[in-house]
């Protein structure tokens, strides 16, 4: 009985209990919706509009990293640590300091982006019309920062309900407002453009309508959480009164802990996510003036990048429970279990990324017209075919970064990311500035970034753990399974492409390819029943695998 209780407690600590699968699925659906909503937006604002949207959003992301990116995780961790010890007065102090820093930093970054918008749009990006979207989106910096802070606080208090509901509100409202505002503001921009004889006003104002959806999508959930927080105060004050105040932390100590906890996360994010804004600036500045760089960047950011990032969202959601498990095993010095969890994380990333890469490479010419109705199609399909290999390296580098963070080796992640980023910038400069490649050069540079990051992270982990990797089972079986499924969907696509619409064909090939891949993985023992039980949705695969005698 005691062993059973200990096992249940350990599974709860590692985040793989019954609620883990539910929240992982919610996270995956919310993440996918946040990506998918760009598809109908692209069909409204076009490739040029996507470029303006990307300029505004990437600039917003850069400023947001400094004030709100790390807040949810750091506040959740600090709140949980104090509540578990009954230190509710210290929890209140953590909240006060966090709110002051986040609100102050958010307002400062909002004002900086607002007043620098014209300069950034005209002098840095070379597209003055993108300033309209930047100014609207700058307001969202402080809104999203405070919203994330509230979510982190409730998670630290042990409840995911406010976060889940607010996330649902955010995505639904964002999608609705984004599409309505993009259409209406685009029509207004077309009238302005007709008067000024500049057709780009339609796309620029359409992009501004799109970012308005992001701002409203943060404002309403924030109001919801403010109400919930106010209702929560009476019960929290009762807990504070019961706290005798022993070991009360000073505000200076809390500020120091917050800053030291936030700094590594922000630095890693600046290096890994900052590459996007660097890519954008370098491509726009180094490309020949005669080339339609705005349209090409719109295709890259609004078509290729949306699809290429989708597998990463799913992989992150599925593997989310394994990183805390690695941290628990590392803290308890259970080296055997630590190695097992690390290999499981890597294997899952390969199992999920390889079929996605094969599907995109084979189905690019069919998938792009199925999803997008305006703009460049051939270029988007070309980028997706070439960049499909980046999906695999991105998934592996993310997985290995998660292992290093679980091992409390954030310094290694930062160093490896910085080295990869520098090589990536040099590669991009050579390909765009010297070789004079088109947007394909950016995709190649992204592949170099994630491939090198994967290698460096693997070396860092091997120095710490010395993993004995079964390459045949970890790489060989997924490659064979993905290859066979790829050949099958290629033949189906070639035989039926003229008889069935691209949308129906994409769904047929996706379903057939997925079923063949899963069947081969189970039949070739690419993943065990024990491993499937530890991932969200694994029980369903086990049920059908046994029903069809594949396990």
Image (spheres, rainbow, N blue to C red):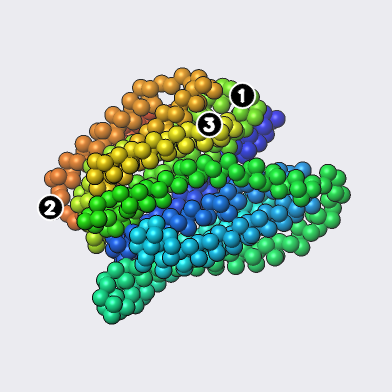
Q: Nearer the viewer, residue 210 or 35?
A: 210
Label 1: which secondary element: loop
Q: Residues within 10 Å of mark 1 (few under 14, many from 20)?
A: few
Name above or below for residue 490 compared with residue 141: above
User: Which badge, 1 or 2, comes first in the chain's sequence?
Assistant: 1
Residue drawn at (29%, 58%), measured in percent from left and top? 294
Q: Quadrant of residue 188?
A: bottom left
Q: What residue does disc 3 label? A: 412
Mark in the foreground, 3 or 2:
3
Label 2: which secondary element: loop
Q: Residues within 10 Å of mark 2 (few under 14, many from 20)?
A: few
Residue 307 at x, y percent in the picture:
34, 49
Q: What residue does disc 1 label? A: 334
Residue 195 at x, y percent in the picture:
28, 80
Q: What is the C-alpha distance between the residues marked 3 and 2?
A: 51 Å
Mark in the foreground, 1 or 3:
3
Residue drawn at (56%, 35%), measured in percent from left and top? 410
Q: What residue does disc 2 label? A: 498
Q: What is the C-alpha distance between the residues marked 1 and 3?
A: 21 Å
């Amino acid at each position: 009985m005691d062993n059973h209780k200990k096992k249940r407690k350990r599974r709860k600590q590692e985040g793989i209990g019954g609620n883990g699968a539910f929240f992982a699925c919610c996270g995956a659906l919310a993440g996918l919706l946040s990506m998918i909503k760009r598809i109908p937006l692209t069909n409204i604002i076009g490739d040029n509009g996507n470029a303006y949207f990307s300029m505004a959003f990437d600039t917003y992301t850069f400023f947001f990293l400094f004030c709100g990116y790390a807040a949810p995780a750091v506040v959740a961790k600090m709140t949980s640590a104090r509540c578990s010890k009954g230190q509710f007065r210290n929890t209140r102090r953590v909240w006060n300091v966090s709110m002051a820093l986040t609100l102050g930093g958010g307002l400062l970054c909002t004002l900086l982006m607002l007043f620098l918008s014209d300069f950034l749009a005209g002098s840095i990006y070379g597209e003055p019309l993108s300033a309209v979207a930047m100014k609207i989106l700058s307001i969202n910096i402080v809104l999203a920062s405070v919203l994330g802070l509230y979510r982190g606080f409730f998670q630290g208090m042990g409840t995911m309900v406010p976060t889940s509901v607010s996330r649902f509100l955010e995505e639904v409202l964002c999608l609705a407002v984004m599409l309505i505002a993009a259409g209406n503001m685009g029509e207004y921009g077309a009238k302005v453009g007709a008067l000024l004889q500049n057709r780009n006003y339609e796309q620029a104002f359409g992009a501004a309508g799109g970012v308005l959806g992001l701002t409203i999508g943060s404002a309403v959930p924030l109001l919801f959480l403010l109400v919930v927080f106010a209702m929560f105060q009476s019960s929290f004050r009762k807990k504070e009164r019961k706290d005798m105040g022993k070991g009360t932390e000073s505000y200076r100590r809390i500020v120091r802990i917050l800053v030291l906890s936030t700094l590594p996360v922000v630095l890693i994010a600046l290096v890994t996510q900052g590459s996007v804004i660097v890519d954008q600036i370098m491509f726009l500045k180094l490309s020949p003036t005669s080339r339609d760089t705005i349209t090409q960047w719109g295709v890259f950011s609004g078509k290729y990048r949306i699809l290429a990032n989708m597998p990463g969202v799913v992989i992150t959601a599925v593997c989310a429970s394994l990183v805390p498990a690695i941290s628990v095993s590392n803290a308890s010095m259970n080296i055997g279990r630590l190695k097992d969890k690390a290999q499981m994380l890597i294997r899952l990333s390969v199992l999920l990324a390889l079929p996605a890469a094969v599907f995109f490479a084979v189905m690019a010419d069919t998938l792009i017209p199925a999803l997008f109705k305006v703009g460049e199609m051939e270029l988007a399909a070309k980028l997706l075919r070439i960049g499909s290999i980046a999906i695999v390296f991105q998934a592996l580098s993310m997985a290995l970064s998660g292992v290093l963070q679980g091992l409390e080796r954030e310094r290694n992640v930062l160093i490896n990311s910085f080295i990869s980023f520098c090589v990536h910038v040099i590669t991009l400069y050579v390909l765009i500035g010297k070789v004079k490649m088109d947007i394909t050069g950016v995709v190649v540079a992204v592949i170099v970034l994630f491939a090198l990051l994967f290698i460096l992270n693997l070396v860092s982990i091997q120095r710490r753990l010395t993993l004995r990797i079964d390459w045949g089972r970890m790489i060989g079986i997924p490659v064979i399974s993905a290859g066979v499924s790829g050949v099958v969907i290629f033949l189906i696509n070639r035989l039926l492409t003229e008889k069935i619409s691209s949308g129906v064909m994409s769904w047929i090939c996706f379903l057939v390819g997925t079923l063949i891949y899963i069947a081969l993985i189970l039949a070739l023992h690419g993943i065990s029943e024990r491993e499937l039980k530890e991932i969200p949705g694994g029980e369903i695969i086990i049920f059908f695998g046994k029903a069809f005698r594949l396990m």
